[in-house]
Image (cartoon, grey):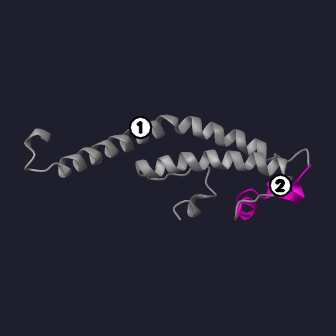
Amino acid sequence: RALDPQLAMAEVRLDLSPYQLHRLDEALLGTVNELKQYDVAHRHSAVPNFETAIALLFPELTPEHEGHEDIPGPLDLVTRIVMLRRRLDPVVRDADAELEAQRAAAEEAQRQADRRWWKPWQR
């Protein structure tokens, strides 16, 4: 929803939690893999709504434009997504480290809660 009003802009701004950043990174990687498959499969996808999203966001990548030399193909978009992932890498690494710290803190809190007051040797 936050992207829709910004789609026509050259640059978009999103405020994401560490978890959302992690998921964005995974989504970009999945998109790269699906775009490669999309190109190999003559611009058809088995992923639900992928072709609809491509037609909406990148109409030049639809099957009717396949083979036109002057129109960029799915692999050109792959290159741009990989470059974006590389630019986001430091932020995603920080987010992953924060998620790991949160997980470790939650595990420690659970260990503390699980300790029985009548077993002082476990304190």
Does the segment drawn in magenta span residue 78? no
In the structure shown, which secondary structural element does the residue marked by tag 2 occupy? loop
In the structure shown, which secondary structural element does the residue marked by tag 1 occupy? helix
| Three-letter amino acid code of the residue under disc 2 | Arg
**Residue 9's quadrant in the figure?**
bottom right
Point 61% across, 47% down: residue:
28
Front in this rendered view, residue 80 or 6: 80
Apparent side of residue 119 relative to residue 111 in the rendered image (left or right): left
Residue 120 percent across, percent down from the top left: 8, 42
Dot 1 or dot 2, earlier in sequence? 2
* Image quadrant containing the C terminus: top left
Does the segment drawn in magenta span residue 52? yes
The region drawn magenta spans 49-67
| Three-letter amino acid code of the residue under disc 1 | Asp
Give the residue number, with chain letter if any, for mark 1.
94
Query: Of the numbered discs in the image, which one, if any, rests on residue 3?
Result: none
Residue 14 percent across, percent down from the top left: 48, 53
Point 88% across, 55% down: residue:
65
Residue 97 percent across, percent down from the top left: 39, 38
Apparent side of residue 39 relative to residue 57 in the rendered image (left or right): right
Q: Residues within 10 Å of mark 1 (few under 14, many from 20)?
A: some
Does 56 sit above or below residue 112? below
Apparent side of residue 22 relative to residue 52 in the rendered image (left or right): left
Give the residue number, with chain letter if any, for mark 2.
43
Point 50% across, 51% down: residue:
13
